[in-house]
Amino acid sequence: MKFFTALHSPALGLLFGLGSALTCQAEDPTYYRGNTHTHSLWSDGNDFPEMIVDWYQQQGYDFIALSDHNILAEGDKWMAVEAVKSRQKVPGAGAMEKYRARFGETWVKTREKDGKTEVRLSTLEEYRGRFEKPGEFLIVPAEEISSTWRTASAPKGLPVHINVVNVKEVIKPAIRPTAVETMRAVLLSVLEQERVTGQPMLAHLNHPNFQWAITAEEIAQVVEERFVEIYNGHPGVHHLGDATRPGQEKIWDIANTIRLRDLHAAPLWGVATDDSHNYHGGEVSPGRGWVMVRAAALEAGALVTAMKAGDFYASSGVTLREIRFDPSTRRLSVSLVVEPGATYRCELIGTRRAADSPVGEVFASKTGASVDFDLPEDALYGRITITASVPHGNPSFEGQKKQAWTQPVGWEQTR
């Protein structure tokens, strides 16, 4: 059996293993908590980037990626103060006042232009030094590449949004006649920039159910993509699907079944994010979803490398103490950090090899803070969804409970 130990600050013992992909180290890497999908006034968010970074740091996150639409926080950008106020979801929220109170008059730059007061938006390089500490907190450059696919039936286009983490330069959005072509065009641009710069980058497909724009079948075809949001904290992304369309977690299973059974391709890793836009009241608020990444160091390249290896899990509130997978016995085990008063339902989910097997079947379900599952011999893959009995503190949909999701295992043996 191969398993791994790590500590996540403050001193949460964690173990994680993904079959033969990893080897035991004498000094195990640490797990880092981070959010890879967040918006500021640089695009359609409603707060200053420094205020947002400060919030995540104060909440105990280890890293944050501000991923504004089709832009990086570079260059000289000014915004009318009245425009800042107009984005507040609560009248009198006082974004400017809070900004000045937190960072001081000498930091906040304003000017008068054409009869309007404007405020300057700080660049990443200007503010990162106020927050970053080696081994403690990191800001990773990111962009939400916001593309569209257009057909005669959808002339205005449907969204294809892909976040690129640890990006070097702005990547332009694509417009193509199909979702598949659009996704592929963007991903090839990401891969090309990664090749040219030598900088490790990660691209994840965002909220496929937003405007019902992308199906699981389409996602499966784009094998260049290895990551998809399985939980996105925006209330408008149809996380649960509807009566005729699958939710985001089921989309994950459908796409992975097609990839493994039909395309003989590697599965998608599942990501949880905030997609936060509102920081002064409003529904699209922060603190809803994140990733826990087991990396050798709190450095952008190390985080990306670990995630590309599937060495992370997604969470909306449940913390894992231990994950083990023994490829020789196909036993998958988890144990949890127990919240007072909470109970936990753990479900082993996957799809069998037979073409007529149900997709995303619950192979087994157990209640407890420490469980073992034996992955069926005919399973293409297996993963565990953990659901707590306690409600999410900032729910994005009615009745939401805290959850966590492990990555698919056992699939290397079926390819």
Image: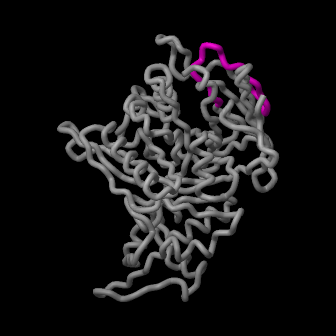
Query: Vertically, is 55 above or below 296?
Result: below
Q: Is residue 337 visible?
A: no
Q: Is residue 105 visible?
A: yes
Please name whichever residue, 47 or 86, is drawn nearer the observer in this view of the structure.
47
Q: Where is residue 184 shown, x and y percent of the image?
A: 36, 41
Residue drawn at the location 63% of the way across and 25% of the way down: 410
Q: Is residue 288 left or right of residue 149?
A: right
Residue drawn at the location 55% of the way across and 39% of the way down: 270
Question: Would residue 374 be counted in the magenta stretch?
Answer: yes
Rendered-image quadrant of the N terminus: top right
Query: Vertically, is 97 above or below 249?
Result: below
Rendered-image quadrant of the C terminus: top right
Q: Where is residue 152 shown, x and y percent of the image?
A: 17, 38
Q: Where is residue 61 shown, x and y percent of the image?
A: 66, 58
Kindly give the residue lying farthest to the left in the view shown. Answer: 152
Q: Where is residue 80 shown, x and y percent of the image?
A: 37, 78
Residue drawn at the location 51% of the way across and 57% of the way down: 199
The residue segment tinted magenta is: 367-384
Question: Would residue 326 be counted in the magenta stretch?
Answer: no
